[in-house]
Every structure is written in C-alpha cells, then in structure tokens.
Amino acid sequence: MFRKVLIVGLATLGLAACGATTRGAATGGAIGAVAGAIIGNNTGSGDAQTGAIIGGAVGAAAGGYAGCRSEGGCQWNQSNQDHSQLYTDQRTGGQYYLNSRDGCSYWRNGQLRGC
C-alpha cells in the first residue's frame, strides 16, 4: 500500500508545472487516497485498498474543482483577463483557450487540454 501512495505522491510532484486545476486534482486525489486507506483499514471489513480508491476519486474531484475555482472559473469567460480568445482545434473542431496564468490550454468547458 505504501508503494502505491509513494507513486501517487511522485506523480503529483510531476504535475506541479501544470495548472491549478490539475495540481488540485492530483493533490486532492493523493490526500483522499491516503485518508481513504486509513479509514478503510480501521473501519468495517478493514479493506484499505477499496477505501483508497474511493477516497482518491472523491479527493481528485474536489481538488480539481477547488483548483479550477481558484483560477477564476472553469469555463471560458470573455471577461476573465487570464483567458485568451477562443481557438478552434483543427483535428477535433472543439474550441479551446489559453490560460495566461498557468500557460496551459483548456477546452471551452474548462477541461484541461494540455500544458
């Protein structure tokens, strides 16, 4: 179990160059996995692995949302000075913007496109 937590922790450090949304999701997932493993191990059937999976998923969702909100909103907003104009991806036809705060690109709905 400790090995899995270590791998998640190292992956979190690797995402440090990406935006707050990605960092929040990775950090929340790691913290949630550790907390879920501890709670799962100490309650009920003592299943730390299931607790880690559930805790990691919930933590990643909450951390991603918190990181997104810290950047002034998830979806593209014309009045957000950190958001560039919308561009069209030639391959998919989807619209995306560049976030000047973290240098990453996001789809119009706020999902990470790439860093």
Image (cartoon, grey):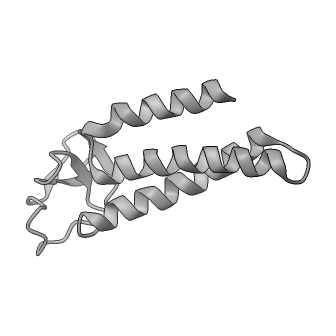
Task: Say how many tags the image has.
Answer: 0
Residue depicted at 39% across the width and 64% down the height: 66
Camera-nearest residue between 110 and 29: 29
In this rendering, does residue 74 appear at all? no
Residue 99 x %, y %: 16, 54
62 left or right of 33 in image? left
Residue 71 x %, y %: 24, 63
39 left or right of 63 in image? right
In which quadrant will I find the C terminus? top left
Depicted 90 relative to depicted 111: above or below: above
Direction bottom: furthest residue: 79
Residue depicted at 90% across the width and 53% down the height: 44
In this rendering, does residue 72 appear at all? yes
In which quadrant will I find the N terminus? top right
Quadrant position of residue 76: bottom left
Direction top: furthest residue: 3
Quadrant position of residue 83: bottom left
Camera-nearest residue between 89 and 19: 19
Residue depicted at 45% across the width and 57% down the height: 63
Residue 106 x %, y %: 25, 52
Depicted 100 relative to depicted 69: above or below: above
Camera-nearest residue between 42 and 75: 42
Depicted 81 relative to depicted 98: above or below: below
Residue depicted at 32% across the width and 49% down the height: 112
Residue 29 x %, y %: 53, 47
Direction right: furthest residue: 45
Quadrant position of residue 48: top right
60 left or right of 104 in image? right
